[in-house]
Image (cartoon, rainbow, N blue to C red):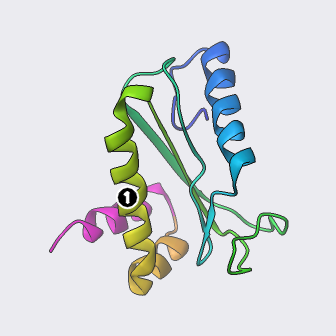
Amino acid sequence: MELALPDADPATLETVFQGVLAREAVSSTAIGDGLAVPHGRTNVIDGIHMAAGIAEGVEDYLAPDGVPVRLCVLVVTTEAEAGVHLKALGRLARIMRNHPLRDALFGAADAAAFAAVLARSETP
């Protein structure tokens, strides 16, 4: 949570975390091909906030395709921004269906390289 909301106070972080956990309890956000997109909506934040990370050795976080999660992307938005929320989730799914982009994200050595892959995914 701290990566997505670096300036948030502990109470805000906890509220966002509980919202994401509640969404995860509905159904797993591990969507396949090694990707999980834990997400939630809450009114204790403004706008959209995201953070990403490579997950190593999380054997109990399996997607429906049985592939262990290797990449987690957290997406949190306000309740009012359902459209933005859905667009972000859809875009992430499209990126992950592009095997060269997905492999480049998995292989990114650092945050700058990861961001460069995402930027490259936006070019026609």
Give me the residue at 53% from left, 53% from top.
52
The amino acid pointed to by label 1 is Ala
In this view, the residue farthest toward the right is 60
Q: Is residue 45 above or below residue 121?
A: above
Residue at 46 percent of width and 77 percent of height = 102
Tell me the residue at 43%/55% (across/down): 89
Q: Position of residue 28 (x, y in %)?
A: 69, 57
Disc 1 target residue: 115
- Asked if 28 appears above or below 24 in the picture, the reply is below
The rendered magenta stretch, by its main secondary structure, is classed as helix
Residue lying at the far bottom in this picture: please name it. 99
Q: Which residues are magenta?
A: 110-124
Is residue 78 something one can see in this rendering?
no
Above or below for 104 versus 43 = below
The answer to which of 13 and 29 lies nearer the viewer is 29
Where in the figure is residue 120, as x and y percent of width and height?
A: 26, 69
